[in-house]
Structures are given as C-alpha cells and as structure tokens.
Amino acid sequence: MPEKNLLAGFSFFSDVDPKTLEAISQQSEILEFKAQDAIFQVDEAASHFYGLLEGQVDLILVFKDRVLKTDVEYEEAIQATIVDEEKKIVVDRVAPGQVFGWASIVGPSKRTVNAECSQYCRVVAIPADGLKALFDKDHTLGYTVMSRMCNIIAKRLRNRTDKLIEAWGEAFDIDSI
C-alpha cells in the first residue's frame, strides 16, 4: 500500500477530494521496473490503471510489415520470399506525474499498446475494478476522471495520427494527404 496521499502529486487527480484520493491510494500498490521491462503488452487483459512516480515509460504501437527478402546465391539463382517483420513506433512518452493504461477503465479492457520502461521506473498500480466501483458510487468523480481520460485518449490519438501521416509521407514520398 502506498504512502498517504501519494496520488495528490498527479494533476489527473487534482480535483478529487482528499478522502476519495486516500481510498484510491489504499487500493493501490507501488511497482518497480528496470529499464527495458514491459509493464504491459498489446492485447493483454487490462486490469490496472497506472501513475508514473519516477522514470519514463514509452507507449509503443506494434505492427506487422510485409517485407520482400531476397537471397542471391549466384546471378541466375535469386530466392525471394515475403516475410512479416514486427515493427514498433513510440507514439507517446509518459513522464513522472502522468497516468497511463486507460484501457483498463474504458472500452473492452484490452491493452492497445505496449508500455515499456526506457529507464528505471516506479509506478503506482491502481486496480481498475476498485476505481470503477468508486465511479459507480460517486458519479461526479466518475465524470471528472472520464473527462480527463478523454483528453488523454484524444492526445494519444493525435500522436498516432501524426506518426501515421509521417510514415505515409516517407513510404510514399508524398507531401500531403
């Protein structure tokens, strides 16, 4: 269990009254990760919402790219095959004082990205079921958190779109879409 009012340093929770913040904190636990550790991966069940206390977390979109691979033995013997390569794009970086893992609270509760530590990290893990139960009891709290969650989702969607447009521009040598 984290120390008292640990979540008070997160702007995401700035409008939550201290008593409710303490109730959320009581359900939470502090986790530590080394650099390169995965906190979660795409398509995993999403059971926790996270706040970053220390370090940096990369949110990574993983996709498959079909690539033509050739093997030339000699001039007339060329072997060509199409293979799937896994590629990663960092779509956002989480800094201390920010939250991540919104899929645990919104939608089908499946992760949409990988969350990987780019350095040593300390995070506070909040069970999503407990948080949603508080929303059911206090609709104002639920509205406040969901409103902030929408802002985070919109920002991350903008980041993904920007990365996609950048990749299309490079891949197809175009100036506008």
Image (cartoon, helix red, strand yellow):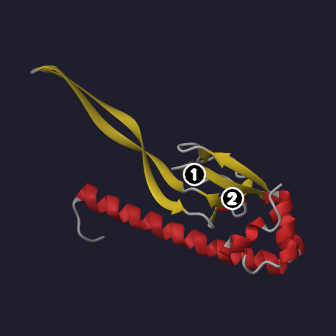
- In percent of width and height, residue 128 lies at 78, 59
As drawn, 160 above or below 155: above
As drawn, 116 above or below 85: below
Q: Secondary structure at mark 2?
A: strand
Q: Name which residue lies at 43% across and 66% down.
A: 161
96 or 177, nearer to the observer: 96
135 or 122, nearer to the observer: 122
Dots 1 and 2: beta carbons under 8 Å? yes
Instruction: Classify mark 2: residues with Cα within 10 Å, few (<14), some (14-19) or many (20+).
Output: many
Quarter of the image where one finds residue 10: bottom right
For disc 1, the marked residue is: 115
Quarter of the image where one finds residue 133: bottom right
Q: Name which residue lies at 69% across and 58% down.
A: 50
Count of labels in the image = 2
Distance from disc 1 to disc 2, alpha carbons, whole Å, reads: 11 Å
Q: Name which residue lies at 74% across and 67% down.
A: 7
